[in-house]
Image (cartoon, rainbow, N blue to C red):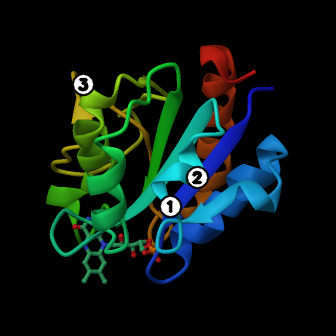
Amino acid sequence: MKTIGIFYGSSTGTTEDIAKRIAAKLGVDASNLYDVAKASPSDLAGYEVLILGSSTWGAGDLQDDWYDFLAKIKKLDLSGKLVAIFGCGDSSSFSDTFCDAIGTIYTDLQGTGCTFIGNVATDGYSYDDSTAVVDGQFVGLPLDELNEDDQTESRLDSWIDSLKKEGLE
Ligand SMILES: Cc1cc2nc3c(=O)[nH]c(=O)nc-3n(C[C@H](O)[C@H](O)[C@H](O)COP(=O)(O)O)c2cc1C
């Protein structure tokens, strides 16, 4: 298994909880789990794989703590690193901006030279619009703990299977 760092921003603990579940499934030690509110861009350096998680707030906005962190890491050279993005949102109340933070992170990191993994088919999701959809697929894993928490476990498992096939191991 490659070295994996998980970086998350979470306002009410949902994305943090998912980050911990992903870490447990991958056998990633808690020392490799970072709240972006307290992390430094140099923390990324030691990892071959970065798993980045943000909830979406406002109307399609990043989770607050991501703004400063993303502004800094988008300037880094991340070539050679694999990047997988996940997000928590609400596909019912915010159907027009469902998990947009995934799309923002994906767009902002385009110039870093990283390789994105972990696209997800839109099948099975109900939403009107999302900037996380590029060329017909989500560019990361959207999760909806408010309306579809019964699907989270299987969505996580199938995403992690795809990540492994795309070079995580
Ligand atoms: C005021 C407010 C605005 C929100 N805006 C969005 C949004 O635009 N898109 C979306 O998918 N979810 C939106 N959500 C839902 C949150 O992303 C969701 O509750 C998420 O699980 C919170 O995760 P966190 O506790 O890790 O921050 C919003 C929630 C609130 C209360």
In this picture, residue 8 sits left or right of residue 54: right
Quadrant hosting residue 85: top left
Percent across and percent down for residue 54 are 41, 60
Circle 1 is placed at which residue position? 40
Badge 3 local density, few (<14 within 10 Å), some, or many (20+)? few
Circle 2 is placed at which residue position? 43
Whether tag 1 and tag 2 are in contact, CB under 8 A, the answer is yes
Distance from label 1 to label 3 (Cα)?
Answer: 33 Å
Q: Nearer the viewer, residue 66 or 152?
A: 66
Name the kind of residue labelled 3 in the image.
Answer: Gly
Quadrant of the image containing the N terminus: top right
Percent across and percent down for residue 65 are 37, 72
Badge 2 or badge 3: first in the primary sequence: 2
Q: Nearer the viewer, mark 2 or mark 3?
A: 2
Q: Residue at x 56, y 64 (%)?
A: 149
Name the kind of residue labelled 1 in the image.
Answer: Ser
